[in-house]
Image (cartoon, rainbow, N blue to C red):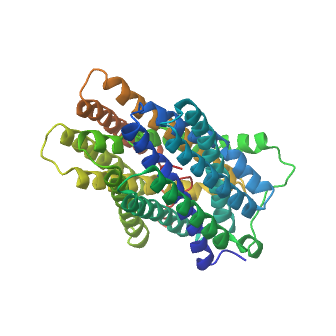
């Protein structure tokens, strides 16, 4: 038996839960450390980079999914580790004014746990989705779960932003506690019993991990897409750690307002992804390469406009952030659409290993991009006003998006139109 549509939606709920926790760590806690606690932006940048760096183990989690099965245990267990990391990270932020060094040490442990949890749960979930979904449903199923994750990010950011004002440490602990408890309940109920009812192909357990990974890396298309992911996702994530501090320092947004801004941005991502999904899948309008280049180019224009708004140019800041999210979503769903098709290409039963490889590349790019953006802002703020420092960083990010668009034209081959856009690796923020 293969996954039914109801079971696919249930897996999407797990993906939604992943996004709900990660957005709190990469947006709300990041803003609190930079604005309320007056820490250099590189501090949360290093913490988020740590959680991404640990996700370089994703190929191993994917290979385990291919060879050992029991993905349900990895999914629930990984989500539990993620929830624990989120709670400890929140406690560390609350504790930081009283004991900064001890709180920072606790933050390191917390973000390491977050990285382990995302890698184990997210990769195992996508491996189950790819191996247990009928081939003709695979891309559409992955698109559904991806959009559900983006919806979870946007809804959580908006809801938490509403309940976080007026901000107090006690209110922060209460809100995060409610979120992680709900996530564990929903994840367990959503995933329970699915794996036992479906057949998922697995590699022989005797296959060494290094051999399996080496065989996937030997595939030319897998290598080329991995390199493209590294560049494009670096651009995608450079604004992740600086957009909310930019809103707070330059536009005087409160913690709740900046969290709502993150929700609005991810709402734009959701709309961009859904639109490309409908046009490319339902109406068969445009090629994969076209949507990637249009998304990258639009993101570059939006970033330049956001930078200009901080310099006093009469441009609406919030709509520009929504536009950035829209073009980011357009680019992301198109870029990772072909990856979902590639997950089942080449040697048989290697879906988990391939998605783990691309997930690791995405995580490295996300960590490097986020850290580079935060570090560059810190350096420039020593000599430039806040608006100019952030603006220069956004301009560099726009340039990288342009380079990614040029690279896409060279490395992304035109896929058959029957392969709709769909994700094969984790989420901005995972």
Q: Toward the viewer: 271 or 424?
A: 271
Q: Residue furthest front?
A: 98
Instruction: Tell me the residue at 34%/41% (across/down).
Output: 245
The image position of residue 89, as x and y in percent, is 56, 45
Quarter of the image where the N terminus is located: bottom right
Q: Residue furthest top?
A: 383
Q: Toward the viewer: 125 or 175?
A: 175
The image position of residue 172, as x and y in percent, is 47, 54
- Residue 156 visible in the snapshot: yes
- Looking at the rendering, which quadrant does residue 111 occupy? top right
- Residue 134 visible in the snapshot: no
Query: Is 414 left or right of 310, judged from the image as shown?
Result: right
Q: Is residue 401 above or below residue 279?
A: above
The image position of residue 346, as x and y in percent, is 67, 53
- Looking at the rendering, which quadrant does residue 34 occupy? top left
The image position of residue 269, as x and y in percent, is 38, 58
Query: Is 110 left or right of 158, judged from the image as shown?
Result: right
Q: Is residue 187 above or below residue 18?
A: below
Instruction: Tell me the residue at 38%/72% (across/down).
Output: 283
Instruction: Tell me the residue at 44%/56% (across/down).
Output: 334
Query: Is 130 left or right of 405, judged from the image as shown?
Result: right
Query: Is 347 left or right of 251, judged from the image as shown?
Result: right
Q: Residue furthest right?
A: 206
Q: Toward the viewer: 157 or 292?
A: 157
Q: Residue furthest left?
A: 314
Q: How many marks?
A: 0
């Amino acid at each position: 038996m293969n996954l039914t549509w109801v079971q696919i939606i249930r897996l999407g709920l797990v993906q939604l839960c992943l996004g709900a926790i990660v957005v709190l760590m990469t947006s709300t806690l990041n803003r609190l450390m930079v604005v309320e606690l007056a820490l250099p932006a590189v501090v949360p940048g290093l913490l988020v980079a740590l959680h991404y760096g640990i996700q370089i183990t994703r190929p191993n989690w994917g290979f385990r999914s291919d060879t050992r099965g029991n993905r349900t245990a990895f999914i629930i267990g990984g989500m539990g580790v993620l929830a624990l990391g989120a709670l400890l990270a929140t406690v560390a932020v609350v504790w930081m004014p009283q004991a900064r060094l001890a709180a920072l040490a606790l933050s390191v442990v917390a973000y390491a746990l977050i990285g382990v949890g995302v890698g184990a749960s997210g990769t195992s979930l996508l491996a189950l989705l790819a191996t247990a979904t009928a081939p003709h449903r695979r891309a559409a199923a992955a698109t559904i779960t991806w959009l559900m994750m983006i919806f979870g990010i946007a809804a959580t950011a908006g809801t938490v932003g509403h309940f976080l004002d007026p901000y107090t440490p006690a209110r922060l602990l209460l809100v995060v506690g409610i979120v992680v408890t709900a996530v564990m309940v929903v994840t367990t109920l959503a995933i329970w019993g699915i794996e036992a009812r479906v057949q998922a192909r697995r590699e022989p357990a005797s296959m060494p991990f290094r051999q399996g990974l080496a065989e996937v890396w030997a595939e030319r298309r897998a290598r080329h897409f991995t390199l493209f992911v590294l560049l494009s996702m670096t651009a995608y994530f450079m604004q992740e750690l600086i957009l909310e501090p930019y809103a707070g320092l330059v536009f005087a947004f409160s913690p709740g307002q900046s969290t709502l801004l993150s929700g609005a941005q991810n709402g734009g991502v959701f709309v961009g992804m859904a639109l490309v999904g409908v046009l490319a899948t339902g109406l068969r309008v445009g090629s994969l390469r076209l949507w990637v280049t249009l998304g990258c180019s639009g993101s570059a224009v939006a970033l330049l406009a956001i930078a200009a708004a901080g310099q006093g140019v009469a441009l609406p800041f919030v709509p520009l952030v929504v536009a950035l999210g829209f073009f980011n979503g357009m680019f992301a769903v198109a870029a990772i659409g072909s990856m979902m098709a590639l997950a089942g290409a080449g040697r048989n039963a290697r879906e988990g290993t391939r998605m783990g490889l691309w997930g690791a590349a995405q995580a490295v790019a996300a960590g490097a991009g986020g850290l580079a953006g935060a570090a560059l802002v810190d350096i420039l703020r020593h000599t430039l006003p806040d608006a100019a420092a952030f603006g220069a960083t956004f301009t560099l990010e726009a340039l990288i998006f342009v380079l990614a668009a040029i690279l896409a034209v060279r490395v992304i081959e035109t896929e058959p139109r029957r392969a709709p856009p769909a994700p094969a690796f984790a989420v901005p923020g995972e």
